[in-house]
Structures are given as structure tokens and as C-alpha cells.
Image (cartoon, rainbow, N blue to C red):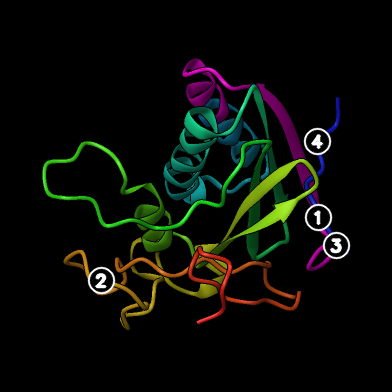
């Protein structure tokens, strides 16, 4: 079974690609993390593992909770940049929320926005794709913990300069994008 992951040409030809089709069960989140760790280790991107594990954990958890019976995880190594996406057949488009204090869930996309250099969501045949990109710290010329810009992104703050959630982009870098507010309208 092959799930659709792309619409149109990729942003650039990747050096390496890994694709995984996983069942939508809670244990699949840990399996996805193990696969990401193995792929990034094999590609020599040890310094990107922690950030990517958190991002993938959040996106895969959303796919397991809201997405249907299976999901697909794709990673692409573009040299200085890692691109990843999670496809699931679920209805609806994810968007950042601002949960009440003490609410145990609802912060995943805020976390993704705080860690990823860019992220977004787009409709796909039979579901949706949530994608992210992370710049390799060596390509950025700084350490992984300090590579993010100090200017806050659009949205309510969560205490860190870059932690405020962004509105998801509908296309990855290199493709025309429309930023939506999650309701299908353009702000």
C-alpha cells in the first residue's frame, strides 16, 4: 500500500529519502521515533536527532489520535536541510490551539512551531500531509540549541521568543504557499 505524500515536484532533489508506513496504534509513536533515530544516525545527522524526534513524536501522535488506521512518515535529507512529512487519511486539518492551563493535550503544534524552522499542512488525496523542515546545525553555522531566530513568530507567546505558534503553511519551501488560519480562509 502506498499513501500519497506529495503534490507537485519536491522542493529539491534529496540526497537520501526514507519512507515508512506504520499502523495507527499508540506503539507506533515509539516505532516512528526509533526509525527516525536510525535514519538520521545512518545519514550522519546525530546533531538533528533530538529536535526531529520531538517533532515527529508530536506529528505522529496527532496521526494516531485523529488520522485513521495507518500513517506514512517520510524523511528527506537535502544536505543542509531535513524535510519530513506525515500523511494520514483522517478528516480535518490540524491547527495550533491554545489549551487552558492544566489541560493535558493540545500543545503539539506549538511545540512543532517552536522547534522546526518551517512547517505546514496541506490537503492530499485521501487525507492530509503535515510537513516540517529543520536546518542542519552545521549548515547554519551555529549549535542546534541556538540556531533559531530570536524574533517571535505570529501567535500567542508561550514564554520563549520563538515558541509562539505559527499559522501552518500549506506548502513546503520551494512551492507556492498560502498561509491559512486553519478555517480554509486566507488571513
Name the N-terminal-most of marks 3 and 2: 3
Question: Which quarter of the figure is the N terminus placed in?
Answer: top right
Q: Quadrant of residue 86?
A: top right
> How far apart are labels 2 and 1 at the CA level?
37 Å
The circle on residue 3 is: 4
Towards the viewer: 41 or 99: 99
The CA distance from mark 3 to mark 2 is 36 Å
Q: Which residue is mark 2?
A: 156
Q: Nearer the viewer, residue 128 or 114?
A: 128
Q: Give the structural element (helix, strand or loop) at label 1.
A: loop
The mark that comes first in sequence, 3 or 4, is 4
Q: Position of residue 174 (x, y in %)?
A: 74, 75
- For the residues bearing labels 3 and 2, Cβ distance under 8 angstroms: no
* Count of marks, rendered view: 4
Q: Do we see residue 135 in this rendering?
A: no
Residue identifier under label 1 = 15
For residue 159, side relative to residue 42 (left or right): left
Tag 2–tag 1 contact (CB < 8 Å) = no
Q: Is residue 88 above or below residue 187?
A: above
- Nearer-N-terminus badge (4/2): 4
Label 2 vs 1, first from the N-terminus: 1
Residue 17 inside the magenta-drawn segment:
yes
The range drawn in magenta is 9-32
Mark 4 or mark 1, earlier in chain: 4
- Secondary structure of residue under mark 4: loop
Give percent across and percent down for residue 93. 56, 52
Q: Compared with residue 14, is residue 59 higher up or lower down, i.e. above or below?
A: above
Q: Residue at x 32, y 73 (%)?
A: 155
Amino acid at each position: 500500500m502506498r499513501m500519497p505524500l506529495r503534490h507537485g515536484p519536491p522542493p529539491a532533489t534529496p540526497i537520501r529519502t526514507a519512507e515508512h508506513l506504520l499502523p495507527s496504534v499508540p506503539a507506533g509513536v515509539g516505532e516512528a521515533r526509533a526509525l527516525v533515530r536510525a535514519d538520521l544516525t545512518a545519514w550522519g545527522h546525530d546533531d538533528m536527532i533530538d529536535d526531529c524526534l520531538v517533532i515527529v513524536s508530536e506529528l505522529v501522535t496527532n496521526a494516531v489520535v485523529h488520522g485513521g488506521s495507518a500513517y506514512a512518515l517520510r524523511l528527506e535529507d537535502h544536505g543542509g536541510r531535513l524535510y519530513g512529512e506525515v500523511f494520514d487519511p483522517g478528516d480535518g486539518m490540524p491547527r495550533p490551539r491554545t489549551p487552558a492551563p492544566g489541560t493535558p493535550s493540545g500543545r503539539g503544534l506549538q511545540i512543532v512551531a517552536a522547534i522546526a524552522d518551517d512547517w505546514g499542512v496541506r490537503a492530499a488525496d485521501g487525507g492530509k500531509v503535515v510537513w516540517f523542515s529543520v536546518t542542519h546545525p552545521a549548515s547554519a553555522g551555529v549549535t542546534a540549541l541556538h540556531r533559531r531566530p530570536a524574533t517571535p513568530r505570529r501567535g500567542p507567546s508561550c514564554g520563549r521568543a520563538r515558541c509562539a505558534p505559527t499559522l501552518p503553511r500549506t506548502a513546503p519551501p520551494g512551492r507556492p504557499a498560502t498561509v491559512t488560519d486553519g478555517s480554509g480562509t486566507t488571513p
